[in-house]
Image: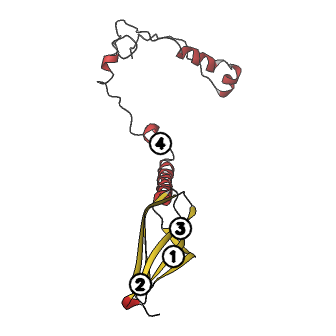
Amino acid sequence: MGSGQSLRSSSPSPKWSATDEDDFPDCRDWEEDIAKFPYVEFTGQDGITCPTCQGIGYIPPDQVNELVALIPYHDQRLKPRRTKFYVLVSVLLCLLASGLVVFFLFPHSVHVEDDGVQVVKVWLDQKNSLILLTITVTLRIRNSNFYSVTVTSLSSQVQYMNSVVGTQQMVNVTRIQPLSEKLVNFTVKSKMGGPSYYA
């Protein structure tokens, strides 16, 4: 900042040693007190006004975006400590977060198992030589995802001697909560007669 006139004295300057600092424990307090003094511009014959602040002691707000601070190449602020450690921790945290997102949000399979036939009803249509069957089957649907799923459609077929004798389709079947299972009952009607009747 501003420079003032220097005073020369013929008396030799005192030399301080480590023992002298112990004798004056308030030296550090003096330095802190001196640092609290406001900026003062000393002008005189050899005085030069600070070109940055123009002698006012602070940078005007309208010049903040116009000034550039020069930092020495070997300044410690340009060489932060533990940079590799922080970069490695950041990469590991990103990988962990990505893995958790993929594990919890990636769709898992929905398992459907046959829980057995519950009810079978048989009718004989002698007039048309037909056998009418009504079969009620229970399915166990298991949701392995971490979010709920909706079974929108369910279709089934009844085969006899490699021939399809009945079909059934249901829509908007049920909604299954995360990591749970649910039993679904559905009924299939089938007809056997004519070429496919071997009784």
Marks 3 and 1: in contact by CB < 8 Å?
no
Which of the pair 130/97 is nearer the observer? 130
Outermost residue, front side: 127
Mark found first going from the N terminus, 1 or 4: 4
Write down the quadrant of residue 79 in the picture: top left
- The residue identified by callout 2 is 127
Q: Determine whether, in the image, residue 36 is placed left or right of residue 29.
A: left
Mark 4 lies on a secondary structure that is loop
Q: Which mark is residue 80?
A: 4
Is residue 126 among what the camera can see? yes
**Mark 1 residue crowding within 10 angstroms, few (<14) / some (14–19) / many (20+):** some
Cα–Cα gap, marks 4 and 2: 95 Å
Q: Earlier in the sequence, mark 1 or mark 2?
A: 2
Viewer-proximal residue among 46 and 182: 182
Residue 170 position, x and y percent, is 43, 65
Amino acid, disc 4: Pro
- The amino acid marked with disc number 1 is Ile
The tag earlier along the polypeptide, 1 or 3, is: 1
Q: Which residue does the numbered mark 1 point to in the structure image?
A: 135
Q: State the CA–CA distance, disc 4 to disc 3.
A: 67 Å
- Left/right of residue 175 with respect to residue 71 in the rendered view: right
Label 2: few (<14), some (14–19) or many (≥20) C-alpha neighbours in 10 Å:
few
Question: At which x and y percent is residue 14?
Answer: 59, 18
183 w.r.t. 197: above or below: above
